[in-house]
Each structure stands twice: as structure tokens, then as C-alpha cells.
Amino acid sequence: MDMDSADTEPNCGNSMVVKAYPLRTMTSNGIGEEEEDEEEGNSGRFEPYVGLEFDTAEEAREYYNTFAARTGFKVRTGQLYRSRTDGSVSSRRFVCSKEGFQINSRTGCPAFIRVQRRDTGKWVLDQIQKDHNHQLGGLMEENNITTITTTPRPSAPAPTKLPISVPHRPKMKVVDEGDKDVISFKRFKVGEETQPKASEPYAGLEFGSANDACQFYQTYAEVVGFRVRIGQLFRSKVDGSITSRRFVCSKEGFQHPSRMGCGAYMRIKRQDSGGWIVDRLSKDHNHVLEPGKKNSGVKKMTEDVLDHIELNDLDKGQRENTIGKEWYPLLLDHFQSKQAEDMGFFYAVELDSNGSCMSIFWADSKSRFACSQFGDAVVFDTSYRQGDYSVPFAMFIGFNHHRQPVLLGGALVADETKEAFCWLFQTWLRAMSGRRPRTIVADQDLSIQQAVAHVFPGTHHRFSGWQIRCKERENLRSFPDEFKYEYEKCLYQTQTTVEFETVWSGLVNKYGLRDNMWLREVYEKRENWVPAYLRASFFGGIPVNGVYEPFYGTSLDASTSLREFISRYEQGLEQRREEERKEDFNSYNLQPFLQTKEPVEEQCRRLYTLTIFRIFQGELALSYSYLGLKTYEEGAISRFLVRKCGNENEKHAVTFSASNLNASCSCQMFEYEGVLCRHVLKVFNLLDIRELPSRYILHRWTKNAEFGFVRDVESGVASRDLKDLMIWSLREAASKYIEFGTSSLEKYKLAYEIMREGGKKLCWQR
């Protein structure tokens, strides 16, 4: 929608000079403000509907603003989606101002509209949610209301031309400055009494450039009495361009003795039009103000540097940092204390180009040793991103031989850039002697995808389940229930990639969703999240739906403060390790009952931990409810069709090689979980194979998995890495001697005697 400039008043004296653009007045059939009262009873005729067309996304936003004003809520600009071809904006969301939970006034309201750009250049409303979860405020006040119209598609049920009233801010005085579209303060005076509020920033104030915003905030600061620094910036995860900037009080933070953690700031956000708008603001200072204080240093930086930063995609030294400066001395002091107790404790701090501390990584010797056992399938857990956490705490998580989560390292993430994640992954890899995981579960943000591909080439990257579910809730809410049911069925009931492709194609064709942007995007990334594509890779027991138990449960959450973080971290870690010790004890000292007389069951009871044996035992018991039929044989290769008794639809194909006893099943349970499925066990039973070949009993699932690295000697591990593994293993064994040997004097004598006798043998062998 075009926007005409406000009336100019060149003789406005010393008033503040601001370019302002009120909404253009549009009328239809002579209906104007005088007829507005007659139309109020027909407000339902102005409701948005799927299929409504607009010339621009801006026109759609103004239309939704108008609808919101009549209905009784406010609108915020939500997410945008870009084309993967040329990077242009392909769809936009406009949401209720109470959407989300980032601040206390928001209630997670689901109301929104989404408009999508068509090939014709038009924008069409393709998704809508009208239900609010809060009380609506009724009609807006009629002060400063102008009239606009929209032109829906002729085939739509709504009228083609409607008078709609929309509120806007009071007009601002404007001085004609030729063709320069800049904000000027040349005529602004401190003592000006006309329009006293015009000099103050407010949410929604627009600027032509970030430079204009900086000059405005600088002038405001001089009047109020503080100085300004240029603060954090944020980048687009799509193309890396700057999307928002913060200007802060010079006394923000604690990096210098003169600073006192002042919370005053103004944040601006880039709009699609190229302009900038104030979207967050705090005017409260925690120090004495000095009206008239000059900002010459900032002005010079603004004029000489800020434009250069915008044009050149930002100097590398200007990275944001979400870690509070007060965290570094506290954490580093804790790490040094840990290193004195644990010689295998590892930590590293990322430095930016200016030598400032950024991200931090750490791992103790037990975590590093656990990675040698269970680092083949890793979760990079960034749950802090789901809420407004005060601690940007990320974890590397593995799953042990009891299928319990084990910590493989912790980190504080300074910013969510490719550089930060690359440094973090490379540091973790260095701490773990270069042992890359076979698979990794991590978020789907572009910066993380790029970092995984760069540091872990060949590793299968699976998207985090919480992100997938969040996107599904957001995008599926406007779809019919029938589609949602078939969508879930397509994802979780298709067994092969070919079957998924067929069902998906039929689904999008049935509902006419070939052009749906979100469905196209998730389909392009199907190998990273669709179960049928994940089953061919080993994920160490992580469920197909991506739901797993949080490592720290609720002990570390959004409210965890700096003072509590370290103690809760250590307590939670010790609790997890105590649970692992209990399972180790149970696996060595408890004997589960056998359900069959098959030698294969006794073999697995002897080798597997209790948890893994119960999984295997369940598959073995279920194999008796299946029928196996040989369908093909040529030389040593045979194929079997294994189907469930009484259910013709549940069937799988098993291929078996008699020359080396290799077997593979179309369900791919062994490839995904590392435990043989009921279908292969049925075929082994038919062929009278009494014990499982050793290749089908993964050492990581056995009771003595802690010595699994010994097998790597034969697979060509570098001598330095092997020495590190042996050191960690022996240190872990020695720590157990110390732990149990110091519990009483008698146990101390026994532990000492065992080590002394062992020492004699080592000396003799030398």
C-alpha cells in the first residue's frame, strides 16, 4: 500500500524535525468517516479470510492492523520466510502482540495471519487463526482515524470494497529538507516546550537508516543526561545480514570501573522496506543523569563507522556476546579448582579479534572417557534456546550401555553464529582426541548446519525434535484435522524412503498443497528429520520421535542464576553418575529370568546389560508371533518374507548370506538401535542358528563396555589417541579403587594389597 507524506510545516520554529508518514486515506463509493458509525454493526464483514489478496505485504499488515483495531487487539510483525533460490521474502506472518512468552505481558496468543507472495507479485492470505487466549479490548478510540479500503479477490465471499477505520500516531511536524530522507535535529533545543514528548523514543518509531536511529538516540541522550555506546547486533540466520541493533547507555555492563550495569537501551529492527523501527526500549537508568552531556565520541563513531559497518556486513570484532561479563572470572576460578583435583579436566575459552572472552567449553576426565565409549551418537542439546534463559548453556550428550544420558561436555555459547559453533565443535573434537561421532542430533538453524558440515563431514545431522514439533504446531494449526492425521501417519508409519515418497506425494496432491512454502522446505530437508531416512544410521537408542529425558531435568532452567549455576551443575552431574553406578551394579549382580530355552537368549543375558537384554528379550518373544517364508535363493543368498500372524499388512523382507552369516532387515532396527529385530531372529530360528554372530552384539551395549576402546587398537587408532584412551581408562579404574578403598580401613588395606600385587606383575613384565 502506498504511503503519502504528511503535510509539511516549514515555519515550525525550533520543533524537533522528524519525517513522518501517516496512512493514506482511501474511500469507496463515497463512504467516509461520517458513515463509520453505521458500519460498526457489520464488523464481521471486515474479517480476513483465506484467499484475500493484497498488492504488497505492507498493505496486508495495514489491513490486519485495521481489523485488530476494530476487534480490540494489537499487532506485531512475526516471522518471515525467504526463497532458497534468490533470498527474497516469500511469506510473512503478522501476529497478535500477546504472541509468545518473552515478556510478562504476553500470553502465548495463537492469533495470526500469514500472507504468501505469488508468482504474479500479489500477496495472498494463506493461513489464519482468529482465536485469542486473552480478553479483547473492544473498538479502538476514534481519534485520528482515517479510512482505507482493500480490494479482495472477486470470487471471495466478502465485499470487494470496504471502508475500514485505522488508528495511527498523531502527526509530527516536518521540515522540508529536499530529497534527503534523514532525521534531522538541527533545530532541536533543550528548552523547547512545543511537543515536549517528540524528543523521546517509543516503540514503533521509524527511521530511514540505523545511522538516523543512532543520531536520534544520541540527541535524546544529551537532553536527558547520559552518554551512548553502540551495543549488540543480531544477524539473519538466512543470509547473515544485520537485522537489529542496540544502542545502550555508556554505563551498561561491568567491564570498566566506571560502568554500573545500567539497563537503559534502545533496540531497532530492520523492516522489509529497508527502514528501521524501534521494537524494544528501556528508559530506566540506575545512576545520576547529567542533562546536556555531550556525545561527541559516539557521534564520530556513528558518522565514520556505522555506515561502513552496514555496507560491509559488519567488522568481525563486533560480534555480540550473550554471556554476562561477571561469569568469566567465576567459571575460570571454578575450572582451575577442578583441574587441581582432576588432571584430565579440560577447558577452553574462545577469544574474538579484540582479545575479549566469548564462548567457553569444559569437560572433566569422566566425560572425556565416556566419549571414547559412547561418543558414536551425540546430542548437541541447546534447550536454553526454547525460553528466555539467563544462562546460554549447551551440552554434548551421549547415551551409555544402559541407555542413560551421559555428559560429554558443557559450554556457554556467546552468540549463535557459524563461527561460534565451529569453534565449539572443533574444541569438543580436540578434547575428545578427534573421535568424530557417526551421528549428531542438533538444531536446524543455518549456522549450526554449516558448522556441523564443516567440522563433522560425513556425520549424519538429525534435526532436534523440539524444533520440529514447534514448527509443526505453528504451521499445522490452520490445517484440517484430516490432514494432520494423514501427515502423522505418513511420517511415523512409512517404513522405507520409497514408501514415504509415495505417501507424501499423494498427501500434498490430495489437499492441493504443492505450493505450500513450509511443506516444500521440510520436504527438502527430509533426510535430516523424517524417520524413514534416519533408520539407516545408528543413533544409540535415541527415540525415533526425538523425545529423550533432559539431562538436568528441571534443576537448570530459565530462572537459574549465576550464583546457583555451578552448584546445580555439579549436583546434577553427580546424581546422573550415581544412577549409572547403580545400573552397573545391577547388571553384574542381578540375573533376569529367561523366557525361552533358546541358547541365543542365554548368550545375550550373559553379555548385555539389563536394559539392553530386556529389549532383546522382547524382540525374541515377539518373533514367535511371526511367520517366515523363503521367497528367493541364489547361491549363498536367500530372501525371506516375515509377516505377523493375523496381520497381512505388517511384513518385512530379510536378506541372509550363508557364507558369512550376514543378515539385514527392511525395518533397519539393527542399523538404528544396534539390537537385532524380531524379523531377523525369526529367520535365524528357521535356519537353526543357535547363537548370534559376534558382529550383532555391539560392545557398547555389553556389561564391560568401559573397555570397548581396546577393540580400536585393531582398527588403526593413532598411537597418541590410544595412549590418551588408556590413561583415561586406567584413571577411571584407579578412581574406583580410591572411592571404595577409602570407605573403611579394612577396604583400604585390601585395595592397597591388590594394587601392590598388580604392581609387581607390571614391573616383572617390564
Image (cartoon, grey):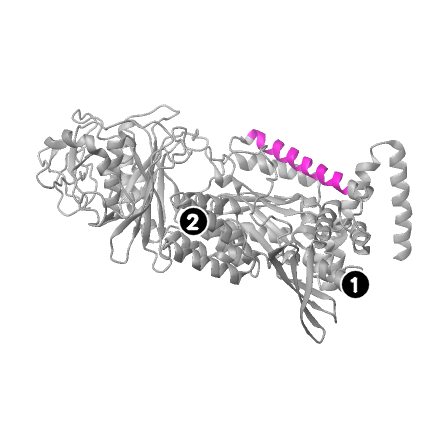
Crowding at mark 1 (Cα within 10 Å: few <14, some 14-19, many 20+)? few
Dot 1: element? loop
Q: Which residue is mark 1?
A: 688
Please tell me whether the stretch drawn in magenta is mainly helix, strand or loop: helix
Apparent side of residue 740 relative to residue 481 in the rendered image (left or right): right
Instruction: Kindly tell me whether residue 713 is visible in this rendering.
Output: no
Apparent side of residue 649 relative to residue 588 in the rendered image (left or right): left
Total numbered circles: 2
Apparent side of residue 424 relative to residue 195 in the rendered image (left or right): right
Q: Measured from the top left, where is residue 190 in percent x and y?
A: 21, 27
Residue at image coords 66%, 57%: 670
Q: Measured from the top left, where is residue 59 in percent x and y?
A: 23, 45
Q: Measured from the top left, where is residue 437 in percent x and y?
A: 62, 55
Residue at image coords 46%, 49%: 417
Crowding at mark 2 (Cα within 10 Å: few <14, some 14-19, many 20+)? some
Per the rendered image, the range of residues in magenta is 563-584
Residue at image coords 13%, 41%: 26
In which quadrant will I find the C terminus?
bottom right
Q: Which residue is mark 2?
A: 483
Q: Measured from the top left, where is residue 761 in percent x and y?
A: 90, 52
